[in-house]
Image (cartoon, rainbow, N blue to C red):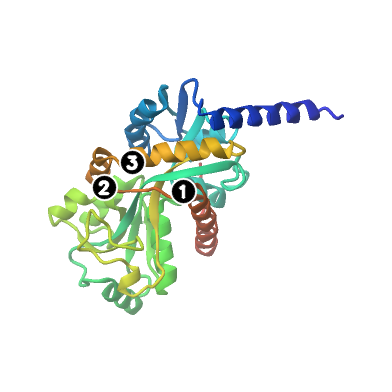
């Protein structure tokens, strides 16, 4: 017997005892923690705080939202990856889970190996925006315009490696066009730069643009989701506008540490799905420009694997680098 054997036996005993508790219907028997790897106030945090009180009601136990920001979400994600796989620590996170390992060396977690996906909670697309003075009115027109002026169009992002950056690079590759990246320190400054005419193109998060779109201050061309967004059904998708297969979704999902017993994962998934399906939850997400999620654990796991591969290709091809 080597030195690791007692640790492995103890870990297996924990998993067996937790699984047995789930099968008996006794889970949870104490407060549950939801880790959010960002500061309070963002869409990921708001999603966690929206579902936490409803989960607490259904569990009969407190559900605590614990914000652990830092290092571009790495600190909170690592903490969740190393938590006990007993169902009492969950992670609510967005696509940074799949992007960060492609951007940085020595990331302290593996998005596939170190987590048990539970479900997606909410999702929303980016929206392709252009400056109102740009003489294009649809995606095909933008592509033709860019091809006739290679390297002349500037596009904004909220920073290197952000969803607004990756979406634009995926668009460039898919359309075969050349645009110049102009990074800003966040989505707000990027939107302001677009409205001021400092840049001509921006792939903005739909929830951040709903008020401006209604006011007619921006020219939207399409959304990045595979189907039209409920918050802006008049906008076509990029896929239906000449780039079949184009897809970028910003999601917020719930995961547990790897080796969390499947009965507990499925119990949490059922309860979370019931919560996001409530009319009040749908309304709250709609106000944010988002749709509810609801992928089951296997479908969510497939999404994570797909995004790790997709963003890896985009980051490598565009030679994107980001500093923590």
* Other-residue count near label 2 (Cα within 10 Å), few / some / many at <14 / 14–19 / ≥20: some
Q: Work out how far the residue at label 2 is from the one at label 3, CA to CA, in angstroms.
A: 21 Å
Q: x and y percent of residue 248 in the render? A: 39, 59
Could you tell me residue 322's position as x and y percent? Answer: 50, 49
Which residue bears the numbered disc 1? 296
Residue at x 42% of width, y 74% of height: 176
211 sits to left or right of 71: left
Q: Which quadrant of the figure has residue 233?
A: bottom left
The spot of residue 224 in percent (x, y) is: 34, 61
95 vs 53, nearest the viewer: 53
State if disc 2 and disc 1 touch (CB < 8 Å).
Answer: no
Callout 3: SS: helix
Q: Residue placed farthest to the right in the image?
A: 1
**Residue drawn at 60 percent across, 39 percent down:** 258
**Tag 2 near tag 3, CB within 8 Å:** no
**11 above or below 171?**
above
Q: Residue 276 carries which label?
A: 3
Q: In whole angstroms, how far apart are the C-alphas of marks 1 and 2?
A: 28 Å
Q: Which residue lies furthest to the top in this view?
A: 30
Q: In this view, does 202 lie to the left or right of 219?
A: right
Earlier residue among tags 1 and 3: 3
Q: Do we see residue 147 in this rendering?
A: yes
Residue in the image at 45% along x and 30% along y: 34
Label 1 crowd (10 A; few <14 / some 14-19 / many >=20): some
Which of disc 3 and disc 2 is earlier in sequence? 2
Mark 3: give few (<14), some (14-19) or many (20+) Cα within 10 Å: many
- Is residue 255 visible in this depiction of the protein? no
Q: In which quarter of the image is residue 93?
A: top left
Tag shown at residue 208: 2
Q: Where is residue 169 in the image (x, y as percent from the top left)?
A: 42, 63
Secondary structure beneath label 2: helix
Please, what secondary structure does the residue beneath circle 1 have?
loop
């Amino acid at each position: 017997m080597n030195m690791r054997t007692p640790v492995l036996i103890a870990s297996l005993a924990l998993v067996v005892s937790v699984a047995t508790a789930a099968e008996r219907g006794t889970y949870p028997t104490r407060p549950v923690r939801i880790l959010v790897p960002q500061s309070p106030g963002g869409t990921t945090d708001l999603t966690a705080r929206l579902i936490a009180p409803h989960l607490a009601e259904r569990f009969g136990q407190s559900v605590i939202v614990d914000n652990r920001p830092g290092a571009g979400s790495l600190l909170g994600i690592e903490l969740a990856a190393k938590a006990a796989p007993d169902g009492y620590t969950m992670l609510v996170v967005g696509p940074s889970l799949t992007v960060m390992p492609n951007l940085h060396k020595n990331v302290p977690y593996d998005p596939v190996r170190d987590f048990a996906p539970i479900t997606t909670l909410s999702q929303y697309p980016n929206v392709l925006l252009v400056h109102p003075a740009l003489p294009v009115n649809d995606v095909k027109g933008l592509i033709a315009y860019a091809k006739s002026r290679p390297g002349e169009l500037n596009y904004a992002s909220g920073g290197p490696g952000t969803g607004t950056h990756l979406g634009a690079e995926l668009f460039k590759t898919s359309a075969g066009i050349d645009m110049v990246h102009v990074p800003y320190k966040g989505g707000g400054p990027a939107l302001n730069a677009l409205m001021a005419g400092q840049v001509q193109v921006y792939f903005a998060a739909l929830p951040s643009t709903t008020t401006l779109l209604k006011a007619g201050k921006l020219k939207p061309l399409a959304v990045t989701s595979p189907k039209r967004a409920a918050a802006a059904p008049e906008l076509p998708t990029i896929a239906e506008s000449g780039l079949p297969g184009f897809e970028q979704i910003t999601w917020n999902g719930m995961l547990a540490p790897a080796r969390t017993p499947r009965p507990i994962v499925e119990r949490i998934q059922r309860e979370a799905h019931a919560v996001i399906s409530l009319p009040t939850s749908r309304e709250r997400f709609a106000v944010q420009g988002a749709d509810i999620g609801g992928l089951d654990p296997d479908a969510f796991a497939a999404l994570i694997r797909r995004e790790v591969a997709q963003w890896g290709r985009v980051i490598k091809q565009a030679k994107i680098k980001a500093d923590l």
